[in-house]
Image (cartoon, rainbow, N blue to C red):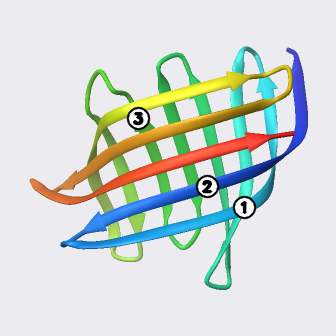
Amino acid sequence: MIKKKVPVKVSLKTTMEQDGQQETFAFEEDGEFIALNDKYYLRYLEHQNGQTTPVQFRLDDGEVHIHRQGATETWLVFDPSQPTITRYRTAYGIMQLQVVTSRLEWELDPAVPAGRLSLSYRLRGGGQEIGSYQIELHFTA
């Protein structure tokens, strides 16, 4: 097992559109890039509205996984070749959501380390469109 952990600066911009309303969030955080068994992880703490949320991106062959642990816990799998199903834990119980990835582009230089991720997706639940989302992520040591 080869594990490499390097501090990085993370820059993230998320645009979401729900019910005809569009919101954009942008922030920069300190994080860490981890290379472990030929898989790559980016971890950071998101600070927003007085709350701290641990976030992890896992970059796999052709897929990206996002895990957020806050007031709600979210596991999202982005696969442009097919929709994926996730469970979204809320205060009211667990909802099943469909993740439809329309664009997934990423570049990674593990030696620096540095990378960028550009992602567009839609969430559907209960047969209805919940919203559409775009994520632009950049990180560098």
Q: Nearer the viewer, mark 2 or mark 3?
A: 2
Distance from disc 2 to disc 1, alpha carbons, whole Å, reads 6 Å
N-terminal label among 1 and 3:
1
Mark 2 in CB contact with mark 1 (< 8 angstroms)? yes
- The structure residue drawn at horizontal position 52% and vertical position 68%, both measured from the top left corner, is 25
- The structure residue drawn at horizontal position 26% and vertical position 25%, both measured from the top left corner, is 82
Please identify the quadrant where the N terminus is shown: top right
* Mark carried by residue 28: 1
Q: Position of residue 120 (x, y in %)?
A: 37, 43
Please identify the quadrant where the C terminus is shown: top right
Mark 1 in CB contact with mark 3 (< 8 angstroms)? no
* Mark carried by residue 78: 3
The reply, left or right, for residue 19 in relation to residue 86 is left
- Amino acid at dot 1: Glu
User: In what element is the residue under mark 1?
Assistant: strand
Q: Position of residue 105 (x, y in %)?
A: 48, 28
The reply, left or right, for residue 113 in relation to residue 87 is right
N-terminal label among 2 and 3:
2
- Amino acid at dot 3: Phe
N-terminal label among 2 and 1:
2
User: In what element is the residue under mark 3?
Assistant: strand
The reply, left or right, for residue 127 in relation to residue 16 is left
Q: Residue tagged by mark 2? A: 12
Image quadrant in which you'd find residue 110: top right
135, 66: nearer the viewer: 135
**Can you see residue 57?**
yes
**Can you see residue 126?**
no
- The structure residue drawn at horizontal position 45% and vertical position 68%, both measured from the top left corner, is 24
Distance from disc 2 to disc 3, alpha carbons, whole Å, reads 17 Å
Q: Nearer the viewer, mark 1 or mark 3?
A: 1
